[in-house]
Image (cartoon, rainbow, N blue to C red):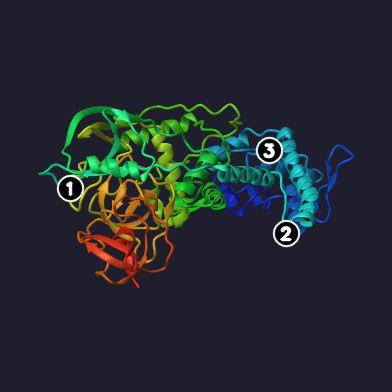
Amino acid sequence: MADRLIIVESPAKANTIKKFLGGSTKVVASMGHIRDLPKSKMGIDIEHDFEPQYINIRGKGDLIKSLKKYAKQAKTVYLATDPDREGEAIAWHLATILNDESKKITRVTFNEITKTAVQKAIKEPRNIDINLVDAQQARRVLDRIVGYKISPVLWKKVKRGLSAGRVQSVAVKLIVDREEEIEKFIPEEYWNIYADLKEEKSKKIFQARYFGKNGKKQEIHSQEETNKILENIKNAKYTVTEVKKGERKRTPAPPFTTSTMQQEASRKLGFTLKKTMSVAQGLYEGVKISEKGTVGLITYMRTDSTRISEEARAAAKEQIIAKYGEKYYENRYYKTGKDAQDAHEGIRPTYINIDPDSIKDELTLDQYKLYKLIYNRFMASQMKPAVYDTMAVNIKANEYDHRDDIDGNDNSISDNNAETDVVDTEQLQYQIGDCVEYNTIYASSTSESGLTPSEGFNSGTITRVIPWAVNPYLINNGTGWVNDCCIISSDNSNDEGCDNADIKVGDKVRVILNVDYDTDRAFNLYYDEYDVIQINGDRAVIGIGNTVTSAINIRNIERV
């Protein structure tokens, strides 16, 4: 007979908690909700204050019997479901079912599944928060009313199979409004002029953008205007007339909330919202780590707060000073938004000393990627701002002005000699010359939407590094850009790189990555195969017959 019974939602969470408690404690899982509204009818008494009519979920009869048996045998029952409104509702339903068997029922919550947090929660039990329960019931009732009332109308009036929902219908309205805005948009033609420049004795090429005439900004709205300017600067001498140097700082972002984690996981990892939350749930509930057992690696992943506990702040300080030095540490406090509930901390690692790379082999690839994203975000939130030099250069060609702003949005490009880029890369995981394998590649260092490369063309050599960029590593002088999160392996000793096979003029080729060689921008693909029209070094011109489509790095095409 156990002195204590602890009920959680999932078996994974139960297994993690078991190791923190003595043999007199039994930990079991409810497998989520045990009661809900019936599926066969509305289940809500609209005429009597919208009273919900709950039933035990079909298939959970044996589980409920077991829970009643365990509750009857225990001296105290702790309902340790998730610390949010959904978890509170599950606890309330459990208390309702078990009340006849035991009067010793109490509620405990914890933001992270660690020994300290679990033991502290058991020492500080509380009553069920009926306000949180009512919030969950209101959500559930609204979901049911909207779905049951409007969905049949959509079937009859619009199309069978359509459905309505409390959130779904609002989202559809936002999409429709946005689409109408797009349809009403009147496009306006504009042109940009770029000049690739270099000193006579230098190998470094940098790109300057046309600004205007005699110091006044000029927008170009037609090809005729463009051709006129090009004609006037065709044989002009480009002269640097002004150089402004400065310094910029970039303050680190706060720890993740649920929404910011989902956004970054989508942007950097290509995860869907569902996938992000599923992987985060696993990291929260516990992952088996050698010599440590099952460990909850992150705090609760449903939160809209950026607040961090003092214990976590102190642990981060110790780790940053030990790894990087005291000059990189800064004690930071982040204000939570006015509308945030602030019931839980921001999303952070529970054990600061467990570096993502130290347990990479014990995590799935998705777990590693997301844990690394969360870990790095939190550590950065307690560090000094990034500092980098800026340089604004004004260049004249006759009376026409060109500008090159060299800063965090650096648009300078180098030729095949990667050593022309002199940058501080000591704080980055990968360096120039490393051969890396990646699962996502980006059209530019600032791109947010990545592409999945074809198998066999998902590796290359880092030839340039921009430390401050979102995607800091340039592959093969033009294949594309990658970041730490999309690199899945590396070989730092590979000096030969990862070259594509020889391709000749006249070959039929397939485009692997549709990034223009000259502009570093993505171009549209309208055909499965293209003809190679011209080759100059690693620059290939492709098209249909003799009609040019684009110039492309030869590594971004494969022979059909």
Q: Which mark is residue 107?
A: 3
Local crowd size for mark 3, using a 10 Å CA cut-off: few (<14), some (14–19), many (≥20): many
Residue 391: x %, y % from top left: 25, 32
Which residue does the numbered mark 2 point to in the structure image?
161
Q: Counting residues from the N terminus, which is met first, the one under dot 1 or under dot 3?
A: 3
Q: Of the residues shown, which amino acid type is indicated by label 1?
A: Glu
Q: Residue at x 27, y 46 (%)?
A: 465
Q: Nearer the viewer, mark 2 or mark 3?
A: 2
Q: Using the image, determine if residue 508 lies above or below residue 65.
A: below
Q: Residue at x 67, y 39 (%)?
A: 85
Q: CA distance from mark 1 to mark 3?
A: 62 Å
Q: Using the image, determine if residue 356 lies above or below residue 554.
A: above
Residue 295: x %, y % from top left: 50, 48
Is residue 501 in view from this perspective? Answer: yes
Quadrant occupied by the C terminus: bottom left
Of 183 and 204, which appears nearest the observer?
A: 183
Which residue does the numbered mark 1 point to in the structure image?
419
Residue 417: x %, y % from top left: 17, 51
Side (left or right) of 261 relative to 376:
right
**Element type at marker 2?**
loop
Local crowd size for mark 1, using a 10 Å CA cut-off: few (<14), some (14–19), many (≥20): some
**Element type at marker 3?**
strand
